Amino acid sequence: MPGLEVAAITLGAAVVRAAFGVWFGDAKLVSEVGGSAIDLAAQKLTSERERRRLQRVRDETADLVADRVQPLVEREFGDLPEHERRAAVDAVRDTFEAATLTEDDLFKQDLDAGYLDRYLRSQDPDRTARAGLGDGGVRLYDLVLRECSAYTIEVARTLPGAGIAGLAELLRRDRQIIDDVAEVLARLPERRGVEDFERDYRQLVANRLDRVEFFGATLSESSRRYPLSVAYLSLTAREAVEGAAPVERVLARSDRIFVRGQAGIGKTTLLHWIAVRAARDADGGAVPFFLPLRRYATATLPAPEDFLNEVGRHIAEEMPPGWVQRQLRTRGGAIVLVDGVDELAEERRDEVRRWLRDLIDAFPHARYVVTSRPAAAPHDWLDNDGFLPAELEPMTPAQVRIFVGRWHEAMRSGCRTEPDRDEVTEQERRLLAALDQHRHLRQLAGYPLLCALLCALHRDRRGQLPGNRMELYEVALHMLLERRDRERRIDARPALGRTEQTLLLCDLAYWLIRNGWSDAARADAVGRIAAKLRAMPQVTAAPDQVYRVLLERSGLLREQVAERVDFVHRSFQEYLAAKQAVDEGDFGVLTAHAHLPAWHEVVVMAAGHASASARDTLLYGLLDRGAADTDRTHRDLLRLIALACLETSPERGPELEAAIRKATVNLLPPRTEAAAMALGRAGPFALDLLIAAPVPPNEYARVLTVKAAAATADPAALPLLARLGGDSRLAVVDALTQAWPRFDPDDYARIVLRDSPLRAGELVVDDRGLLPTLRHLRRLRYLTVSSLDLEPVDLGFVRDLTSLRHLSVSNCADAGPLASCALDSLRVTSASRTLDLAPIARMPQLTQLDVRGEVSNGQLLAELDLSILGMEAGPFYRTGTLEWPRLRRLSLYRAGDMAPLAQVRLPRLTRLDLTVEGMGTTLELPVAPALEHLCVHFGEPPDLSALAGTEVPMIELHHHGRDPLDLGPLAGVAGVIVNVYRRQARVLGENDLGEGSTVRSAWDDSPTTR
């Protein structure tokens, strides 16, 4: 083995021992890193197999390091003598083994390779002299030591957990962890010499910003901090020209983007994600500079040489002169991420704009992304500087589910044992179920900050959210109004405490609700605040200043329309308005307005805010008004609201609860059509009650539950309907499919009908908008598509229907998508133009085909193993096929000339169906010795004489016209069945038919039978 290879392997082992020591977190282990770290770890294991597994991880990781070191040395110092290269690599190994990694900074979150490099040198300052290295060897030593410091950090960060539990996790997932180490090392860009500052900076940015830190709530450490790269979810952004799109697509539309979004929408997280992705893309990726403006609340805005103050302070001293400026001047070489215009005082925002303008003037080729809350800067705030404004939008329900999944995946990535991971998975399942069941949770979860709060509270409470939504709102408001800004060290002026903010916001919320307004003019809102402040002498600021703080910092108010203010979250407005109503003793007002949609939740949460006696007054008032109301709609609605109040009421007397239960016994679940409609009209709060009610076993009650949920047309009803989706009773299946058009078709198919048995696997669709969603229906076997318009049906959707076996579709212009589809049966009507049958001839499993209209390439059908075929007579004759050896049933439509049929040989045919055109058409039969059943449809009677001598056991004649039908040619023929569908049509010779013959008329209930 060459000497350099041996040196690289032994160095790799030393690097891994150092990384294990930092990771393991044992003071003795760390201090004895030189040669004994792995051994000390191994002593803590209980079996030889575990020790061997640990050794394998160590050895394979050391090989990964060696595989990086050796090519680096050969590439950068190929002209250095072999013995000098080996001596330099050995010297690096000796430095690692001589170090005692006990400095506290080594265990801080912002550990970086530059710091470790300097620390190792301080522990072994004269190593290069003692190793006798020349100038070239010293440069090589410097390069490899810096590189291996980076490897140490990456390996330590990749290993799971810490301590004994981390060891157990490492042994359980040894192969995966080795693969993860290989991936992170491969992701490191190649070092371009010893002084590759960009490489060190990129690594530091990627490691520092690849985590989410939660502010404003009391949470466990694991719930407060977790990996961004695992948990990140792409949000939707809207800009004026192109509309809504994933934010990454919007970012690609311009080199200057101004991103606005409400509090908690994910602006800072977005900038972290941009920075991490850019830092890890060394092949053409811009160098990211993350600049949180809150760090400059009382300081001068940073010049380019100060851009590393936030990320990179440990290596800033090593930065080459002018390095930041060089990146900024290179086209696409840098991206400046400016976070939080709103987090600086209002009087400094023009200064921020001038600072940005100066940066752009000096460095026009750099990319810029700036964020702010909307209240602090209008959408056109940076228009003159060439910025494209974009607005981040709340998450959709589907995005919320993805967010919850990724948040819990981030938690699983930090778990040390399989039971711990299983517990997180169960918590995820329970939280998703809770979101399905409770509207107030869904309303909060649309904002990433509040969704993360729900996830963290649910996890820290071992899979339980606060039992009462009032407590949840209190925690969230505490975070928004006080703790989040305080923990992020944002100093708003004028300073308002949580109590003062709550008093003012409660007054605004109730004022809007009481007046029936969704928003108000800014001047009116400021006037309302001024009136409230007269009773709050502790607040000395002017009303407009107080309004500005509430608008910019509370996260609850916004000016979505210029000069008009409303609440960002309707649920918080209702909570605050209810508190104000209770404080003012407005229980009569609450009862009188309870039937109005805007007051439903206010009343429900007022029950939570009220004292026990006041709550009784409110709830008995609702029941009394309901009993006295002559409007049944109001009566049922008021009783449902009283029932909803039980969820927010921390205490209530048994007599009151019994009265409410008795009043609503027939409403949940609904037992009558009227009850179902009452639930549907009651609005979202009643849907929550319906979701919480047990699923009725009775078929009719289930149908009514479906109708009630469908009447709301609320996407939140989908999980409830999904609980009924597996019911095979036809009335329930029909109710579910009839409700489909009231919801988003794709969501409904995916959530509700995914596992529906349908009608024994059969479905009829007459809305082409539903066709792309059918891919979700796993039990769909038989599909009929009825086209209600003149447009041909595009069959592209069929490729995704892997379980489909039988398809019937009208108005088809192109059978191309059917090629190679695994259908057993196909019925298709061509559109106005000729239908090419070549794709159908390539359907390997097709055994039954019925095609109407003009076709081409019909001759190819002979290649199929068809047992049943239906075609128009002309196209059938033009196939030129005179023998169909496998056909058992043939149907010919629009048959005028029957002579060609007599030339066709059908040795296995048992049934022949003919639709004959033309008065007096002579019936001709094919050569079909096994024929048992002949069925003839006609509007004008054909010549039946050819059937006089037939030996077919059963003959059916279906007369759809008005002309007389003469059965004389069939005199004496047994087993003839004749059906006449027009009253005017006379039948002649029916009494001469043979034994077992029957003549039926659609207008006569007494058939003639021989």
Image (cartoon, rainbow, N blue to C red):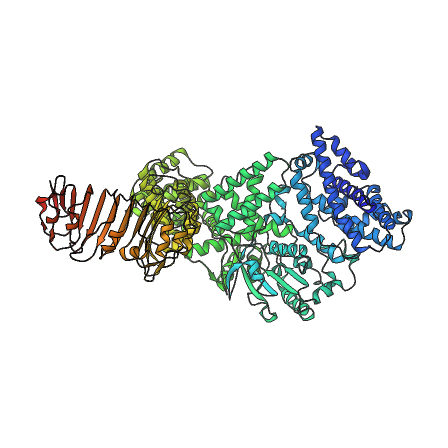
Image location of residue 68, percent across then percent down? 75, 49
> Does residue 540 sit above or below 644 in this rendering?
below
Q: Is residue 429 left or right of residue 994?
A: right
Residue 343 appears anywhere in the view:
yes
Q: Horizontal and vertical percent for residue 30?
A: 78, 39
Residue occupying the point 47% across, 47% down: 440
In depth, the one of 350 and 112 nearer the eye is 112
Q: Quadrant of residue 297?
A: bottom right
Looking at this view, is 478 or 916 the one in front?
A: 916
Quadrant of the rendered image containing residue 311: bottom right
Q: Which quadrant holds the C terminus?
A: top left
In the drawing, does residue 950 fall left or right of residue 112?
A: left
Which residue is nearer to you in this view: 41 or 436? 41
Q: Position of residue 1004 (x, y in %)?
A: 11, 46
Q: Quick check: can you spot residue 681?
A: no
Q: Is residue 972 left or right of residue 877?
A: left
Placement of 116 over or under 267, stated as above or below:
above
* Number of disc labels: 0
Across and down, in percent, residue 664 comes to: 34, 39
Task: Answer above or below: position of 725 versus 187.
Answer: above
Quadrant of the rendered image containing residue 932:
top left
The N terminus - image quarter: top right
